[in-house]
Amino acid sequence: MLKFPKCFIGLVINLIILLSSCAKENLVSYAAWNALSFTESDNSEYLSYMNQPHINLTFPGIMPKRDITFEKGILILDGRYYSITGHNWGNKNIVLKIYKEGTEFKRFILTPELSGGPDNAEIPGIRTFSLSVSLPEGDYTFGASISEGSENERALKTHILHNTENKLRVL
């Protein structure tokens, strides 16, 4: 009779240890990513605007750090690559808008750069963009427009690609 209460108590202690150690683990996966396309096209089918000027932005779904730096169009985070690249793009500046919980939080006027690298030093129509920003904890979305001078902007449509979403969470 004494054996059952000892086993039960041992089982409860093991469950408590197991559950408390699991609660301390970081169960968030940073593997999620999102992909957007900014274009003047109303049609969200990529094939309908792939030969027109557009900008693709990929970014993580969740970030454990607050600093984001796209250098020549590339962000490397935990060994994963994300990009901001203009396709069929000329020399027009873009305004990248970052919204925090629905309100415009930051905006950047980005100047197109020639894509770098040994194999694609100057691919016609491909442009990269560099930016660095520090974001406090929160949920963010992105939008873009074309800068047409001092105060004029022309909004671009945001199309979500690959069944992802327009959402970045900074922890």
Image: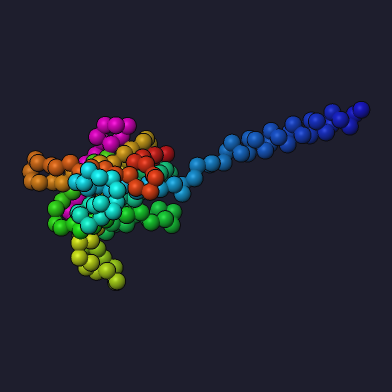
- Furthest residue to the right? 1
43 left or right, relative to 33: left
Quadrant position of the N terminus in the picture: top right
Instruction: Please state the horizontal and vertical placement of residue 96, each as a whole percent of the image.
Output: 23, 45
Predominant SS of the magenta segment = strand
Q: Is residue 39 visible?
A: yes
Colour scheme shown: rainbow
Q: Is residue 132 visible?
A: no
125 left or right, relative to 138: left
Residue lying at 77% horizontally and 34% vertically, measured from the top left: 11
Residue lying at 86% horizontally and 30% vertically, measured from the top left: 4
Residue lying at 15% horizontally and 58% vertically, measured from the top left: 90
Residue 116, by quadrant, is bottom left
- Furthest residue to the bottom? 118
- Furthest residue to the left? 150
Part of the protein shown in magenta: 99-112
Of the pair 75 and 144, the residue shown nearer to us? 144
Quadrant position of the C terminus in the picture: top left
